[in-house]
């Protein structure tokens, strides 16, 4: 009975933390590191308590292993600009609290479990949940930005890689003044020739900007945001100072951000009460056919 109480506390605390992170993601566009550290500490400590009470090392062992695997895999996806650094830490934190699924003896339900860690179920659920909203947002932005009017290539190969890339790049990017930059914004390729600008950016040790050699034949270099974590505060101040000193132009292209934590919260709740959506789809649709 005491174990059930601890499992229930883990679930409730996980939902509460995800709800708090939703507020920060929607209102402020970032997830506080300190809250994530507290969340991870709760995950490890609660599973350590379960290990001490039962004498079974699997609780703390799987908590550490699940956290590590989830962090490494989501970190690789972060490097590919799939989502932000805060989302990576949140998925890993969930893995530390609930490493291998939901014990449902206190719920009169039987969620469909999967063969991979619980955090991966939350991840897949969040992707499936957010996909319709992302498609609706893409259609809205295409219409709003008159993408088809400005890019005849889209008509020539709508389902081609080039056509899809034009659709996404044209819809989810916009130009803003550098003075309006904020921490966490993701910067597209910014072309320049100045060796001084290159030196300034590369000397910033805590930078999320990276300089590359340009092959467009017009400029020597370009810089862009290295990962989906967006620019740091130092990056933001550096770009604003360079603009104020007229070292770089006042306009810059950024990628539009999308608050993803609400999808993670919904994916978590579905995982708790219904299970793995991908498994449910396979069970109820594909296997039936």
Image (cartoon, rainbow, N blue to C red):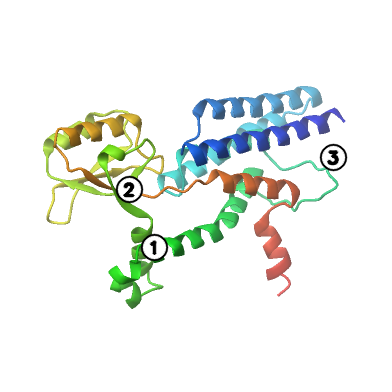
**Coordinates of residue 173 in the picture (x, y in percent):** 34, 54
Residue at (34, 66) in percent of width and height:
147
Tell me, for residue 144, which label it has, or none. 1
* Quadrant of residue 197 within the rendered picture: top left
Secondary structure found at label 3: loop
Marks 1 and 3 close (CB-CB < 8 Å): no
Secondary structure at numbered mark 2: strand
The quarter in which the N terminus is drawn is top right
Q: 240 or 47, which is in the foreground?
A: 240
**Mark 1 or 3: the one toward you:** 1
Distance from label 1 to label 2 (Cα)? Answer: 17 Å
CA distance separating discs 1 and 3: 49 Å
Which residue lies at the image location 38% right of the left edge and 73% below the top edge? 158
> Residue pushed farthest front?
144
Residue tagged 2: 254
Q: Measure how far apart labels 2 and 3 are at the Cα level.
A: 47 Å
Residue position for label 3: 106
In primary-sequence order, the first of circles 1 and 2 is: 1
Residue 171: quarter of image: bottom left
Q: Which mark is residue 62?
A: none
Q: Position of residue 226 (x, y in %)?
A: 33, 42
Determine whether label 2 and label 3 are within 8 Å by CB: no
234 relative to 128 in the view: left or right: left
**Relative to residue 133, is residue 239 drawn left or right?**
left
CA neighbours of label 3 inside 10 A, class few (<14), some (14 to 19), many (20+): few
Crowding around mark 1 (Cα neighbors within 10 Å: few <14, some 14 to 19, many 20+) is few
């Amino acid at each position: 009975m005491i174990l059930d109480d601890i499992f229930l506390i883990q679930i409730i605390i996980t939902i509460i933390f995800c709800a708090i992170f939703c507020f920060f993601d929607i209102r402020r566009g970032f997830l506080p590191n300190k809250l994530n550290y507290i969340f991870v500490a709760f995950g490890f400590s609660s599973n350590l308590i379960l290990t001490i009470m039962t004498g079974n090392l699997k609780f703390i062992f799987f908590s550490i292993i699940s956290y590590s695997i989830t962090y490494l895999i989501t970190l690789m996806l972060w490097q590919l600009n799939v989502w932000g650094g805060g989302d990576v830490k949140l998925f890993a934190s969930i893995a530390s609290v609930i490493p291998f699924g939901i014990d449902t003896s206190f719920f009169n339900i039987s969620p469909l479990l999967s063969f991979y860690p619980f955090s991966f179920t939350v991840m897949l659920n969040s992707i499936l949940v957010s996909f319709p909203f992302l498609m609706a947002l893409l259609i809205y932005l295409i219409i709003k930005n008159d993408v088809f009017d400005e890019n005849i290539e889209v008509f020539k190969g709508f389902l081609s890689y080039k056509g899809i890339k034009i659709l996404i790049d044209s819809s989810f990017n916009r130009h803003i003044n550098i003075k309006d930059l904020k921490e966490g914004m993701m910067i597209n390729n910014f072309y320049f020739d100045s060796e001084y600008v290159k030196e300034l950016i590369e000397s910033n040790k805590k930078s999320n900007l990276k300089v590359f050699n340009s092959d467009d034949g017009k400029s020597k270099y370009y810089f862009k945001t290295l990962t989906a974590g967006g620019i740091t505060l130092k990056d933001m101040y550096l770009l604003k100072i360079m603009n104020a000193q007229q070292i770089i132009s006042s306009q810059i292209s950024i990628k539009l951000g999308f608050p993803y934590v609400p999808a993670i919260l919904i994916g978590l709740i579905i995982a708790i009460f219904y299970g793995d959506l991908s498994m449910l789809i396979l069970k109820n649709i594909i296997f039936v056919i």
